[in-house]
Amino acid sequence: MKKVIFVVCYGFAFLVSLGFSLIPPDAYEVSSGYSIGFKSADPSGNFKTLTGTVEYDSDNVANTKFNLKIPVSSINTGNGSRDKKAQTEEWFDSKKYPNITFVSSKVEKIGSSLSIAGNLTIKGVTKKYTILATVAESGNKITFKGSFKVNRIEFGVGKKSDVVPDHMNVSFVVPATKK
């Protein structure tokens, strides 16, 4: 009888824990107020458009997922002719590769930050990146902030040059509103 009670209790505990882990994370959509900037000695600028979704689970960040898209055509360096040149085949080749994307594969909590691993795709080349971000929650909104470096040469964006550095510092603020 004790074994039956133990099995029933254990089974119930297992089902309860399974039920909690099957609760889907909250779904969010990127909202206004975002910022995707890039900086180097020259050029610097931002992307004016960002879209995507975030599934965020504050209780179990391992369930968190990011799926973000930046249209290359939204590049803004403050110089119209440079922005047009960025669209060319040599640089981003926006006709063939209109978007930069980031899709997460693993999210972990590290201290007060999130470590977001995923695939960054630029100009048809996909590289694994791990990005640290802080997260702030307020009502039905969340905001992720952070920065990382991108080696443009690894993605075939432009050629090695004494004028344009290989590495770009990318900073981001990604607010999202619960759907």
Image (tube, grey):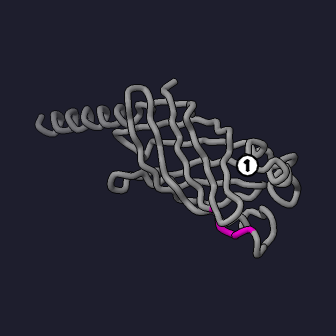
Report the residue at 12% width, 34% height from top: 1
Report the residue at 69% width, 53% height from top: 121
Magenta residues: mostly which secondary structure?
A: loop
Residue located farthest toward the bottom when viewing the structure as drawn? 162
Residue 85 relative to residue 104: left or right: right
Residue for badge 1: 78
Residue range of the region highlighted in magenta in the rendering: 164-168
Residue 167 forms part of the magenta stretch:
yes
* Foreground residue among 29 and 49: 49
Report the residue at 31% width, 36% height from top: 17
Residue type at numbered disc 1: Gly
Residue 61 relative to residue 152: left or right: left
Residue 139 forms part of the magenta stretch:
no
Residue located farthest toward the left when viewing the structure as drawn? 2
Residue 108 rendering spot, x and y as whole percentages: 42, 52
* Foreground residue among 17 and 118: 118
Element type where label 1 sits in the image: loop
Q: Is residue 43 visible?
A: yes
Residue 70 rendering spot, x and y as whole percentages: 69, 43
Q: Residues within 10 Å of mark 1 (few under 14, many from 20)?
A: few
Residue 129 rendering spot, x and y as whole percentages: 58, 59
Report the residue at 61% width, 36% height from top: 52
Q: Quadrant of residue 148?
A: bottom right
For residue 88, above or below residue 27: below
* Foreground residue among 79 and 149: 79
Residue 55 rendering spot, x and y as whole percentages: 50, 36
Residue 12 relative to residue 2: left or right: right
Q: Is residue 93 visible?
A: no
